[in-house]
Amino acid sequence: MNLRALAAKVVFQVLEKGNSLSVALPEQQKQCENSKDKALLAELSYGVMRQLPQLDKLVSDCMAKPLKGKQRILHQLLLVGCYQLYFTRIPSHAAISETAEACRQLKFDGLVKVINGVLRNIQRQEKPLPTDNDTLTYNTPAWMIKRLQQAYPDNWQTVIDNSHQRPPMWLRNNKRSQTRDEYLALLSQADIAASAGEGSDAILLDSPKDVLQLPGFELGAASVQDGAAQWAATLLAPVDGELVLDACAAPGGKTCHLLEHTNIELVAVDFDANRLERVQQNLDRLSLDAKLVHGDAADIDSWWQGEKFDRILLDAPCSATGVIRRHPDIKWLRKQSDIEELVQLQSKILDHCWQWLKPGGTLLYATCSILPQENAQQVTAFLERTQDATLVAIPEQPSSMTVGWQITPGMDNMDGFYYARLVKG
Ligand SMILES: C[S@@+](CC[C@H](N)C(=O)[O-])C[C@H]1O[C@@H](n2cnc3c(N)ncnc32)[C@H](O)[C@@H]1O
């Protein structure tokens, strides 16, 4: 099938059906013949998500009336066409003819001329990218811009710009297989340029690679995980023999890192049964073992009769505003009202997990959010209502930060992330 038609289907799935890009894209990639096609399909789908408001405006301005109902997918096809004209090196004539052909493949033969005409118009007019308001200028919903302005009054534009950069690829060396230096040598032998990151197992690739090109990947020599997410194991700092709870575990990146790190007894729980299967797949690839539970981290009593935990990692469900550079669809799937709901859910899970922590134990609260409501404010409120909780400083955090460590997107090449280390008195 024509790649533009597949891209339109991906964009349709996200914008009209509310599915995430990480589900919709692989589904359509199954129809690609080779990795080059898969990469172009990803580029078109991600690109439209990044630049959506500007593309929407350019397309809508060239239409007499909006496409509705069954024809709606043609609006998404036009976004894909417009993206190619403005943001890729694909020659305009090829972009337009391929996109028009996609219209035929989508079974709208009668509208091929319309698609062709609209794209030719956009190309001929050569309008600059629209910047009439902040949403257009920053390709970000107004409510999100407002929250970021409040949170980062001095550098909100940088935070947004960094959320639109293409993210680097990070690896986590499996120290049970080899040392990081040994793995860097293996990468170098395979002609893959890379350097050590700040975290003890972190490796930053100069350019992204297919995982199957990575030495020993299938045997578990390394995993793909952003540098920011890799701090969880170091900051939780479990000790051999301890009983540890990974309270929101799926898909299991941090679960596996904890087990590579130390010989612990790990209970990994997640609410989502499908995502929990991915934890098992990750454990299998790395030959690791944990007790997996399909359950609610806010109701541990219902599935755990064992003793309390020495340490708890609470990688809470969140807005994911720190990882927009990897998941640009978040900008359109998240709604302002989600934030308050998430804050309440986080606080409920946090309070409950705390009851299951042994005295003297450590709970690491983490999110991939950059909104203070989910992070520093959440932890401040928790400390105020929890007598036996103490916040322990994280050495990596700048001294000006008082409540937890807020990493913003792009900081040392990392995703946006937040950590707070809490000890039970
Ligand atoms: C940020 S993700 C966790 C990522 C994971 N720690 C990793 O490193 O791969 C948050 C997870 O919380 C799960 N979740 C949401 N509410 C939950 C609840 N009440 N109990 C347990 N898990 C929950 C979601 O299904 C999701 O998988």
Image (spheres, helix red, strand yellow):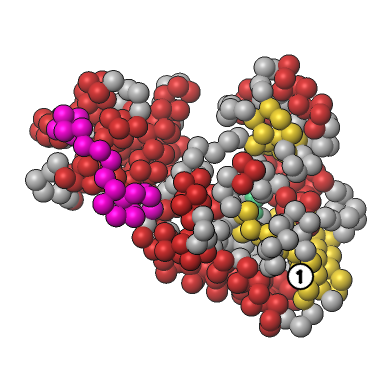
Residue at which label 1 appears: 391
Q: Split into 4 quadrants, where in the image is the C terminus? A: bottom right
Q: Is residue 3 visible?
A: yes
Residue 198 percent coordinates (x, y): 74, 42
Residue 107 percent coordinates (x, y): 19, 33
**Magenta span covers which residues?**
119-140
Q: Is residue 284 left or right of residue 179?
A: left
Q: Is residue 179 left or right of residue 120?
A: right
What residue lies at 61% left-to-right and 75% top-to-bottom? 348
Residue 424 percent coordinates (x, y): 81, 73
Assign a secondary structure to mark 1: strand
Residue 314 percent coordinates (x, y): 68, 62
Q: Is residue 73 visible?
A: no
Q: Amino acid at mark 1?
A: Leu
Residue 139 lies in the magenta stretch: yes
**Picture quadrant of ligand 1:** bottom right
Pick the residue in front: 362 or 280: 362
State the count of labels.
Answer: 1
